[in-house]
Image: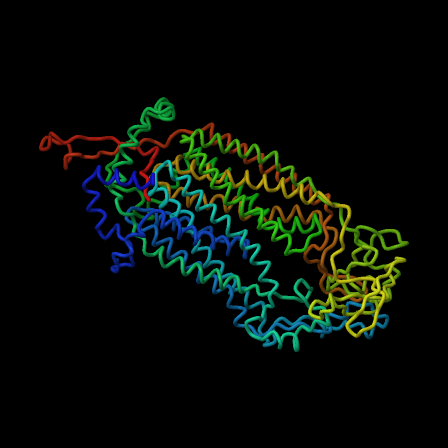
Amino acid sequence: MEMANTITNAKSSDPASTADLDDGGGQCGWYCWKPRFLQCLSTSKSFLFWICWAGGFQSFLINGLLNVCVSTIEVLPVSYLGGRKGACKPRWVGYGVLLLGIGSFVFATPHLASGLYQASVKQQVVGTCSLSPSVNASCSTGEQLTALNDGISLQKFKYVFLMAQLIMGAGGAPLYTLGTAFIDENVSHKMQPIYSGVFYGSTMLGPALGYIAGGQLLRLYVDIDKISAKEWQTYHFPKRVGMAPGGSGWVGAWWLGFVIAGTLLCIAAIPLLAFPGELPGAKALAAAKEVEDSKTEHTEDDDEYNSKNDSETTTQDASISVGQSLRELPTAIKELATRWTFLFICLEQSCEAMLLSGFGAFLPKIIESQFSLSPSMAAVIVGGLVIPCGCGASYTGGYLIKHYRMRPRSILKMSCFWVSLSFIFSLAFMVYCPNQDFAGVTIPYSGKQGLSIVSDCNANCSCSLDTYSPVCGIDNIVYYSPCHAGCLSFHETMVDGLKSKSFGVYSNCSCINSPEFKRMKVVDGTEVDVMAARQTCTSSKCSYQLYLFTVLLFIFLALVFANSMPILSATLRSVPHNRRAFALGTQMIIWRLLGAIPGPMIFGLFIDSSCVLWTHTNSNCNGNSDNSGSCLIYNNYSFSRAMVGLALVVKGLTFLFAILAWWFYTPPVKTKTAKHVNGGPATSANPEAKTKETYAYDNPVVDRS
């Protein structure tokens, strides 16, 4: 209601604005077709809805499903060209969203181009110990998984994935630069943090939904679109061999999320392409901005500026818009490079991006490893934390700026406050659970000294390290595979008498020394003494740590996300209005190159340093291997301390850059613009013409519904 009243007052104050409502430049539609019934959608709220839709599914796609950002080089020219005078920012955003959808479809094409996925039934049952080496199929080459049965090599598809990510990177470039700048141009200085908070909150919602939806979609069989459930059960993965979601040979419907996201992004592109380059009443709003600018001429920030920078005041004609061509790009870059506050804000955001990208990539793994949870449960916890933290905290940060009508220096102080609190709550990662007992890795085999996967009890089994298929023994100890537990027999048992809920159990396990056995009825009707099962071992060593960690992590993430709005608002206030879109694009380049891209690599390096068991390839039947792969087991104590140290260092640098941004802040250089009120320049031929000076250091605009 407040925004609507403000617009009404703005319209009545400038008669020219009435005509602007009817001109083609301010009408909603596609090229020459601008029907009247669409004009009610030509509002900032409508644009906010669709850009939130696009931003949410862009982050769902990139940060949730892909968990990687690839748009770097494309951002600079897109934000510069899209931000020049006369460019239609919504159209750039719309085409970018359309590219995102196309790239998402391209990413899913390898599934459509390949044949049916098949896994060897033999592999699923050879996990047991075979005392005769000639019978042990683990040593045979014909037992390997076959991903594609039509002879197409998976190596060829890496170029398709690379092309798809490049397309999605280019498509995402204008969303956070031109989209944010368009919002800033069409809402008031007071309402801009609220609108931006809603937009960025929706982008935080995307990764959370991506984690949750991705985990659930992976529970669906990869070829669910190609074969019926009956065919799958009969010919491909019978229950009797233990193939189920989460199994070593299971491949989920990874492609389905990209098809869904691509469809929704293409839908969002249609209305975004219909928005005009400037919303109705833009000229009236511009006039109101100038009036409001002049009222802030004697604020504290301006006085400080006048005392330091009066000599830098320049004058230029209003009809000249800097940045009409790429030839002026170096000049624009040089201008931004001389603004210390802007540079320190970029470095501050780079540190935040490093932290968020690192935790975004590895937080599910951290929770899964530290608290012995399944991957799907870890993904649900991360998604459940990110949704309220990302959405709520981002909106709260914007609301506080709007509610207290914060000036730039106050916004920078708020940023320092959020960073200092998040530095303290980085200690949340000190909470961890002791490692689950793992035979040969964290504890020795029964009656043995030293840590080794191979022991006397399984030495004659010729166990292979190629396939990691952990089982939980009746002694509550994890074993690398049924073979490494010395198990000779595999059985299929039922839950509540239902075969559809069956799971694999093992008996006659020579490495499991326990006086207790559990007799269970198997599918063939007999009862066996179960000694191990394909289930996760439960630990009594960690009861309350998960709850404590979840609470502390929630507070930590909320503080990190709350700082996103002060950073954005401070960025917009630290540069002239005609440089804001370009400044956002430049900032995105910096924080991606310095933060988002190296973040996962740095986190991965620290995490790998705490690994105690790696996967192996090309291993022989004696357990020796030629190459190592991904990590299977981490030392939880070392893992925890590595995360704490890394978080404290990054947050410490973030706080340093936030302090420097506040310390060096000065309003952008005033640009005196000659506005000729009486229709011509103030010359001897037009002595009555008056000249009005406006200033570009702060650009509050009028509310718009």
Q: Quadrant of the N terminus?
A: top left
Residue 559 position in % (x across, y down): 55, 38
Residue 279 position in % (x across, y down): 29, 47
In the figure, is residue 185 to the left or right of 499? left
* Count of residue discs: 0
Q: Is residue 646 above or below residue 382?
A: above
User: How was the colour assigned to the protein in this rendering?
Assistant: rainbow
In the figure, is residue 309 to the left or right of 507? left
Q: Along the line of sight, which residue is nearer the eye, 121 or 344? A: 121
In the figure, is residue 655 to the left or right of 463? left
Residue drawn at x 32%, y 38% as measured from the top left: 701
Q: Quadrant of the C terminus?
A: top left
For the view shown, which residue lies furthest in the front direction? 496
In the figure, is residue 682 to the left or right of 541? left
Residue drawn at x 71%, y 51% as measured from the top left: 372
Residue 2 occupies which quadrant of the picture?
top left
For the view shown, which residue lies furthest in the left direction? 685
Q: Is residue 388 above or below residue 692?
A: below
Q: Along the line of sight, which residue is nearer the eye, 72 or 227? A: 227
Residue 480 position in % (x across, y down): 77, 59
Residue 422 position in % (x across, y down): 58, 36
Residue 213 occupies which quadrant of the picture?
bottom right
